[in-house]
Amino acid sequence: MSSHPAAEFDHLPGREVELDVATQDCLIHMGPQHPATHGVMRVLLKADGEILAGAQTHLGYLHRCAEKIGENVDWLQYLPYTDRYDYLAAMNNNLGYSLAVESLLGAEVPARAQYLRVICAELNRIASHLFAVGTYGLDLGAFTPLFSALRDREEVLELFEKICGARLTYSYIRPGGVMNDAPEGWLTKVAEFLDRFEKTWHEYWTLMVENKIFIERTANIGVLTEEQALSWGCTGPMLRGSGVDWDLRRDQPYLIYDQLEFDVVKGIGYRGTLGDCFDRNFVRMFEMTESVRILRQCLAQIPDGEIMHEEVGAVIRPAPGESYVSIENPRGELGHYVVSNGTKIAVRVRVRSPSFCNMSVAEHLMPGSMLGDAASIIGSVDIVVGETDR
Amino acid sequence: MTELLLSTAVSLAVVLAFITVMAMFFVWSERKVAGWIQHRVGPMRTGGGFQGWAQSIADSIKLLLKEDLILRGADRTLFQLAPALVLASAFAMFVVLPFGPGLMVADIDLGVFLILAIASVTTIGVIMAGWGSFNKWSVYGAMREAAQVASYEIPLGLSLMPPIIYFGTFSLKAATEAQTGSFGMGWYIFSDAFWIAIPSFLLFFVAALAENKRAPFDLPEAESELVAGFHTEYSGIRFSFFFLEEYAAMFVFSAVGAVLWLGGWNFPGIQSFEEDSTALLLLGTASFVLKSFFLVFVMMWVRWTVPRLRIDQVMTLGYKYLIPLSMVMALLAAGWEYIKHLGGQA
Amino acid sequence: MSQRDTAWGPMEVQRVAASEAAQALQAVGIELKLCVPNLPWVAPEGEAKDLVRRAKEEDAEPVWRGDAYLLLSEPGQVTQALQHCRDELGYSQLYDLTACDPAADETQLKLIYGLRNLKSKARLILQSRVDKAAASVPSVASIYQAADWHEREAGEMYGITFVGHPDPRNILLPDDWVGFPLRKDYEYPDEYNGVSCKE
């Protein structure tokens, strides 16, 4: 008969370490309310002290039945719902849905509307990446980058407020064109913002990205290999951070992106391994400067003219058929798979959201890293829970 | 005997009032400093006038009025005792600080030693809080505190050795008085051993940040990892005790730095004042408080600038860099004194 | 760079990719039908709104617009088809996997697999049909790991069993949710765990 005091724990799943002490992994719920989950999401962590032995993501806390709503309202009435799945990049969501509906209508919007759409989408990309970079600092314990980022993001939001009256949920880009033309002097204000932003961009670079502690916390953490990134369906900065040269704006050009010059930024393992958290943030940093380049060209080229396709009215009945249209959202590929039977209500509105696919790999990056790295990895994925759950 | 008791009681009451007011001032100034660093203005309205000066008072009233929650599964004794222990230890450290010429509660020969010893008691309070909270995040915070603070006490103590060797005393009052020379500018960092003083001061400052759980070493309460660490489950007045402790401890360690390296209450031209005069007392106290506040400000500045380290990086920094370096500094200081001694003999 | 032929992206390159993939898959014994839309991608002027009426008047083959796709005759062959696409045809990414219930009176659900080739920059859509009554299809999560979460979502929303899925739990819905919400014949519950769902 065993008289060893540790014997009573023998039935528990655990591991034997020196001195016959049975240890047990600790299960911790990170979320649903937790500062680092960027919304209402839960990650069940299995931790051996500070080292993570496993992780499991639980979604659904912010599920708002967007796809079911899409099958019950008019094509146009669904537009405001698209604002609400990725609320940090609502312009891009509007754009993705509008293009999908237009692909069934067979309606190409006028040139000025296309330029206005690209300007708004790229401004929104800057705002979204600013927020991503800022909150990433917050995840790592640095508050100040977030507030610097919010200062610049505020200018973008003010520009949006001037053009469409809303600061977060725009519904500005709509099937058939855009809601209204840019007010007088608006394009000049965009140009002025770009000049200011190019200077402040260097603040983020020196304050955060080149910070020794930041590099220590992100380099070689959560390494996502190219094979993993492809197999898990990662897109956007997550995919490019792993060194894959893929950007829908260049490789499947929509709107006027084929007439614009810009580089596709990809991770190079600047401070660590290719595909680590640092690289994903690095890609976001430089995508902002590329967006500035795109915006400068758009501002120089934008023609005068109509902003709405004249045949797209208030009630639309797209041709029967099914179409998948994807655009490059700040977080990755935002796809809308829309099915129409020729009536004014959709048969199916499927949203392929980038955060959903990007998040699916995060739980596989965590085992073996430390508890503090969980926040670092989730932050580098840059999820918006409104979009993973829809 | 009665007189001694009475004077001690008065001094303690003064210290207690000072801690409370000072902590409230620090909370307000932390918010203002954070605001200025982050392109904001911080609190502006409370008090109806200057820079939201009454914000801390309003905060304290709010904290006092809040419901005091204790989880059903919590260990009530530990949970309730922990904030008191933490605050009491922070309070006790003030006893040996020389605020001004003749203005200190108790001049103990082992003043520095006492501060180090009492600072460790805080750790016990934090561990009690974490364990008693009935929350896994709190336990993690408490375990981190135990690991981190216990390891950083070694470099902290070692980095205090150079000035102690230089002045030949553990008493903070004696150390201050030893720096009165050179028209009040005989501070340790301006002494002949300045090349030891400056690196050892930096080592002390880093170790003090870690000892106080200030960013970038705020692992025990790392809010993006552990929600709020050991004080996740605390609310109301008990939470404010932890808050007070943090700012009180910041001040104490800044004061130790100010006394041992920056001359304590000494200021340029101190010799022209009469001993025991009111002007000397006021200017000396102001000099000491300003120096300490400046160091506290640097701690805030650091907090709002850098990201947080990870726990293994904190331990690596402590054991692999700070301990050897501070040990080298202590040896250099001893060697320098020996060389000076030999030179004096020759 | 792919040719941009519409404002929503290149379409011709996809049609070519679909017909090439159809031949390659048929050559390895996978039964399928190539479905190509019979309307132009961009509607002629004056027709963006009124196609439905015209289609009804002509009373001919149903017209439709959108992406060309391959319809697999046998859902059981989907693993084989995807394996071939990934290993031989270079479709390295499964960008989407979803289902669709065309109408309440239909007996079959559509299953849609979206594949992407990053080298040739082509998209390929594979579809199959499963019976609503016994919706079951082999899981492709072992071929493309991205299918893991997508299959969980499609499974809970449409009541499709993905045979061989490593972790077939609900993902967005609670574990005890009754019914499959995205089916057209779904009835809204009156209450959930004692919480009334009525307005």
Image (cartoon, coloured by chain):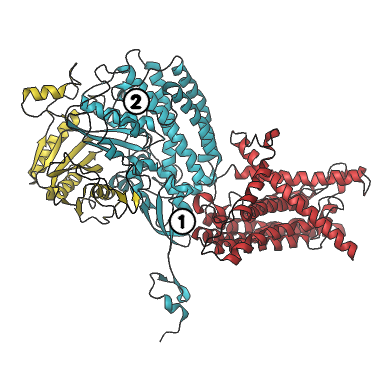
Residue A314 makes an appearance in the image: yes
Residue C26: quarter of image: top left
Q: In this picture, is A104 found above or below A367?
A: above
Q: Residue at x 35, y 53 (%)?
A: A364
Residue B218 at x, y percent in the picture:
58, 52
Amino acid type, callout 2: Ile
Camera-side residue of B215 and C160: C160
Q: Amino acid at mark 1?
A: Met
At x 25%, y 28%, the residue is: A101
Relative vertical location of residue C18 with respect to residue A123 in this rendering, above or below? below
Q: Compared to B186, does A348 lie above or below?
A: above
Q: Where residue B41 sits in the image (x, y, percent)?
A: 62, 34
Q: Which numbered circle lies on residue B269?
A: none
**Residue indicated by mark 2:** A173
Q: Which chain is yellow?
A: C
Question: Numbered disc 1: what chain?
Answer: A
Q: Quadrant of residue C86?
A: top left
Q: Please identify the residue farthest to the left as the structure is shown.
A: C60
Q: Which residue is mark 1?
A: A370
Badge 2 marks a residue whose secondary structure is strand
For the colour cyan, the matching chain is A
Which quarter shows the N terminus of chain B? bottom right
Numbered label tally: 2
**Badge 2, how many Cα within 10 Å: few under 14, some, many 20+?**
many
What residue lies at 80% left-to-right and 57% top-to-bottom?
B12
Q: Which chain is red?
A: B
Give the mark nearest the N terminus, 2 or 1. 2
Per the image, label 1 sits on a secondary structure element best described as loop
Q: Is residue B182 left or right of residue B163?
A: right
Whole-angstrom CA distance, mark 2 to mark 1, is: 43 Å
For mark 1, does the 10 Å Cα neighbourhood hold few (<14), some (14 to 19), or many (20 or more) residues? many
Could you tell me which chain the residue with mark 2 belongs to? A
